[in-house]
């Protein structure tokens, strides 16, 4: 019945718009002009995106193979094409997962405080500092993490945990902002109905507010992960580089896909005087860089698709 009513309302709206545009030629011209402008703006916005995806796909797809995805660069020298990015994929997933474990509880609890409890000067101060953190350059987050762990562990330490902390500094404000907006969308009537039944506020938040907004919260968190997974500058100074596989973020250097792509591309250009040109064929290092960039884009795409699916599965269903 709700579906039938919604369809009838949509038909009535479309009929009203058609009658108005038919009765008023000027309104019809404005409507057509705005449609053209909107579609034109959409096409212009798609040009750099399509160009970027096509460039990465055409340059990196030829390097993708089973060996490239399952081998590391350990004991690979010069133009040997037998190396792979398995160690970089492992490092990216481990560091990003650890950054998510650090950021999500802090960001979610901060958002709950701002929406459900925050009043007065403290709430305004928290909001102000979240806004400030949103604009922090990524290299500053990396330097902060290095300085912090230098005081704790001493100078020269490069481990995955430091990189995860640097990424969490960038991720926390995104999680706070996205979760805060999702919690604000929960109708107050649901909270008031729970309070009227004698349910404590903390239990109302857990059982009503969070359950109602779980789809939006999950989507916001996944988008925050996709935002930090491609950071290069903070990981260069916090994690360093290595050609070996390392799954332990608490000991030893780790390689990540963004750093691997940057390092391989820069090494390739260094062996190709004057950069990439018609008279200098890019070597295997540049092809490795493009291949790693393509894999990173695929990972980000999978995360965005997962966010869409979660939003569809867990969003409230209309009956």
Image: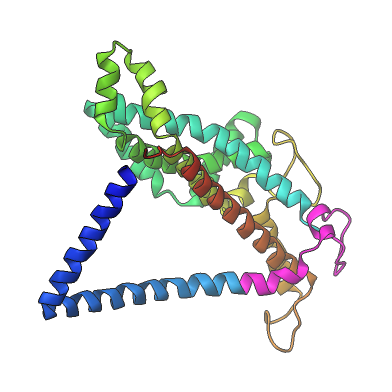
Q: Position of residue 38 (x, y in %)?
A: 31, 72
Q: Is residue 154 visible?
A: yes
Q: Position of residue 208 (x, y in %)?
A: 37, 24
Q: Is residue 39 left or right of residue 192?
A: right
Q: Is residue 27 above or below residue 225?
A: below
Magenta stretch contains residue 65: yes
Quadrant into which the N terminus falls: top left
Q: In percent of the image, x 68 and y 80: which residue is there?
A: 276
Given residues 237 and 66, the one toward you in this image is: 66
Q: Position of residue 62 (x, y in %)?
A: 76, 71
**What is the quadrant of residue 287 in the picture?**
bottom right
Q: Is residue 208 left or right of residue 258?
A: left
Given residues 36 and 10, the one toward you in this image is: 10
Q: Is residue 262 visible?
A: no
Q: In percent of the image, x 63 and y 52: which residue is there?
A: 236
Q: Is residue 181 above or below residue 18?
A: above
The magenta stretch spans which residues? Answer: 55-83
Q: Is residue 159 above or below residue 27?
A: above
Q: Is residue 119 left or right of residue 172?
A: left
Q: In percent of the image, x 51 and y 41: which residue is there?
A: 144
Given residues 278 and 66, the one toward you in this image is: 66
């Amino acid at each position: 019945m709700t579906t039938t009513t919604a369809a009838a309302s949509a038909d009535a709206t479309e009929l009203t718009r058609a009658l108005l545009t038919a009765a008023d030629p000027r309104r019809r011209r404005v409507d057509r002009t705005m449609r053209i402008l909107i579609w034109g703006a959409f096409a212009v916005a798609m040009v750099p995106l399509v160009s970027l995806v096509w460039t990465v796909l055409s340059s990196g797809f030829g390097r993708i193979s089973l060996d490239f995805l399952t081998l590391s660069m350990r004991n690979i020298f010069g133009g040997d094409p037998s190396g792979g990015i398995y160690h970089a994929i492992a490092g990216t997933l481990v560091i990003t997962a650890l950054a998510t474990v650090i950021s999500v509880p802090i960001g979610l609890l901060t958002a709950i405080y701002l929406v459900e409890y925050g009043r007065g000067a403290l709430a305004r101060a928290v909001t102000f500092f979240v806004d400030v953190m949103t604009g922090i350059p990524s290299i500053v987050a990396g330097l902060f993490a290095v300085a912090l762990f230098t005081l704790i562990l001493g100078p020269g330490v490069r481990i995955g945990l430091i990189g995860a902390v640097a990424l969490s500094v960038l991720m926390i404000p995104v999680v706070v902002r996205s979760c805060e907006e999702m919690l604000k969308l929960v109708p107050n009537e649901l909270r008031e109905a729970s309070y009227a039944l004698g349910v404590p506020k903390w239990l109302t938040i857990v059982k009503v507010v969070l359950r109602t907004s779980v789809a939006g919260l999950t989507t916001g968190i996944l988008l925050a992960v996709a935002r930090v997974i491609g950071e290069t500058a903070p990981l260069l100074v916090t994690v360093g580089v290595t050609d070996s596989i390392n799954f332990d973020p608490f000991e030893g250097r780790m390689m990540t896909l963004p750093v691997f792509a940057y390092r391989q591309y820069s090494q390739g250009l260094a062996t190709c005087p004057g950069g990439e040109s018609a008279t200098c064929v890019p070597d295997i290092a540049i092809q490795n860089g493009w291949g790693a960039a393509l894999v990173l884009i695929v990972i980000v795409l999978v995360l965005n698709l997962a966010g869409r699916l979660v939003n569809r599965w867990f969003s409230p269903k209309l009956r």
